[in-house]
Image: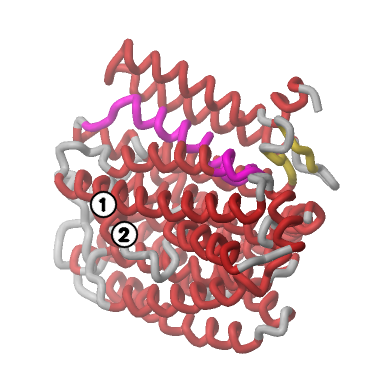
């Protein structure tokens, strides 16, 4: 394949890289004065990348670029589209959060753009070296974003914790990668699959376990979830919304491609690990959230809980399971962004966050529109019909049942009832408790737009896109198994 074709296939990443470099120079020359303009340019670049990326989606569309280092197929297009959508939403709401605090700088948008480039490489990588480069590009940007509010002790603490534990996870992945390379003799996904199909030794098994353990940290799956509540609480809320959406999509997609690609011939080697992580994440996420008074920490445990449901689709190890996983990811992105934007809007007149259940008591009286939006989002996260979140859970459980994993589906359904408790607590506090404080301050229009679109997608109207969504998710899942 010619370099011209390779450059075309990776046009989204190249375009974002060039945009990021140009905006970095503009930021260095202009300082804080052009921060909003830089954000607008970054959003425009991400919209362009999204449009170009979607143009590559098609029946049987799959091609390797740069001599097999990167694969552009329907799976990569689907995952990258969700990543770009989440990044756009998080960029739109950021200026109105940081500007009143005199914390907003152009570097924020630049970091988001480079993070998107890294995540794009992660989901398209079909070589261990490309995978690690994308992973580190995304991770290094994330560490800075977590501590972006430099004068805030909690933000600095969150950034430091994320950096230390993220470095540990990267080291675990790198050690696993070295073992996989050592026992397969290649860094190519296709080569690893062929080598492991011929001879899968105990050392290779250790390599697979270390790689999966590192990925489990990146998606905040139990037992590697310990960083999530502290980082989510301490990081600025727009950054938390970003961490809970785009990087999670990228990490899950990276895990899925790795499990079905190089490790796809050894399903029995990793399936039990994924089943354990799925059930443990569902139970620990649900139980851990029950005692939380801080809203961001509660949503952190909710994120862990949702990862468990996502992993059920992977545990099925079938095209239907991966299709259900991708459908769930699509719905999850909108539920998560909507929830964190709603928290972003919970501010008093002085700009102080309304961060606990006591702060949102009687919200239906003081801010009814916001309370009803939160009600829809919480019921959708709980999987209560007719909201769209129910469909996400339904398709992954259906895939598990079709793969003869009835016990896994039954335990997952039972555990999801536990999670409904803390989601319903939101409703009880907002609609049945008396107000204990002043009404939230008026929120910017940009926040209402993002929240409104998120609520619209997760409402019963979301079922109108199920034929289109199922077709796209099905084509994306088939791309993995066709490549295998």
Magenta: main secondary structure equals helix
Residue 466, quarter of picture = bottom right
The residue shown at (14%, 62%) is 437
The residue shown at (41%, 22%) is 38
Circles 1 and 2: CB atoms closer than 8 Å: yes
The residue tagged 2 is: 227
Q: Which mark is residue 360?
A: none
The magenta span reads 103-131
Q: Secondary structure at mark 1?
A: helix
The residue tagged 1 is: 161
Quadrant where the C terminus is found in the figure: bottom right
Would residue 57 be found to the left or right of residue 143 on screen? right
Total numbered circles: 2
- Residue 289 x %, y %: 32, 73
- Disc 2 crowd, CA 10 A, few/some/many (<14, 14-19, 20+): some
- Residue 40 x %, y %: 45, 26
Q: Secondary structure at mark 2?
A: loop
């Amino acid at each position: 394949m010619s370099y011209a074709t390779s450059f075309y296939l990776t046009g989204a990443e190249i375009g974002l890289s060039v945009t990021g470099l140009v905006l970095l120079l503009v930021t260095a020359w202009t300082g804080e004065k052009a921060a909003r303009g830089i954000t607008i340019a970054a959003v425009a670049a991400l919209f362009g990348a999204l449009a170009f990326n979607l143009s590559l989606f098609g029946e049987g569309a799959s091609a390797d670029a740069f001599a097999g280092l990167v694969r552009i197929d329907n799976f990569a297009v689907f995952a990258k589209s969700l990543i770009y959508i989440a990044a756009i939403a998080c960029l739109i709401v950021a200026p109105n959060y940081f500007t009143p605090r005199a914390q907003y700088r152009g570097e924020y948008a630049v970091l988001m753009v480079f993070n998107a480039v890294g995540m794009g490489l992660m989901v398209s990588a079909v070589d261990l070296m490309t995978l690690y480069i994308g992973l580190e590009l995304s991770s290094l940007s994330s560490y800075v974003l977590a501590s972006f509010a430099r004068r805030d002790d909690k933000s600095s603490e969150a950034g430091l914790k994320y950096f230390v534990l993220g470095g540990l996870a990267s080291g675990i992945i790198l050690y696993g990668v070295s073992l996989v390379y050592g026992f397969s003799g290649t860094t190519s996904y296709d080569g690893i699959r062929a080598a492991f199909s011929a001879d899968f030794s105990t050392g290779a098994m250790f390599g697979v376990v270390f790689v999966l353990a590192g990925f489990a940290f990146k998606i905040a799956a139990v037992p590697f979830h310990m960083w999530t509540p502290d980082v989510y609480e301490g990081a600025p809320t727009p950054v938390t919304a970003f961490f809970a959406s785009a990087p999670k999509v990228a990490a899950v997609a990276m895990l899925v491609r790795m499990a079905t690609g190089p490790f796809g011939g050894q399903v029995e080697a990793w399936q039990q690990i994924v089943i354990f992580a799925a059930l443990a994440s569902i139970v620990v996420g649900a139980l851990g959230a029950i005692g939380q008074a801080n809203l961001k920490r509660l949503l952190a445990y909710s994120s862990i809980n949702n990862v468990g449901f996502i992993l059920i689709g992977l545990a099925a190890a079938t095209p239907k399971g991966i299709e259900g996983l991708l459908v769930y990811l699509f719905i999850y992105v909108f539920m998560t962004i909507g929830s964190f934007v709603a928290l972003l809007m919970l501010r008093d007149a002085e700009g102080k966050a309304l961060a606990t259940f006591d702060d949102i008591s009687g919200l239906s009286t003081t801010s009814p529109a916001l309370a009803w939006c939160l009600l829809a989002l919480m019921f959708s996260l709980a999987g209560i019909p007719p909201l769209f979140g129910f469909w996400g859970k339904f398709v992954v459980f259906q895939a598990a049942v079709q793969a003869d994993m009835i016990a896994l589906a039954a335990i997952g359904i039972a555990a999801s009832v536990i999670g409904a408790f803390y989601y319903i607590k939101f409703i009880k506090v907002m609609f049945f408790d008396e107000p204990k404080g002043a009404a939230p301050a008026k929120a910017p229009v940009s926040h209402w737009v993002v929240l409104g679109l998120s609520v619209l997608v997760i409402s019963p109207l979301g079922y109108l896109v199920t034929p289109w969504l199922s077709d796209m998710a099905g084509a994306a899942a088939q791309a993995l198994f066709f490549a295998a």
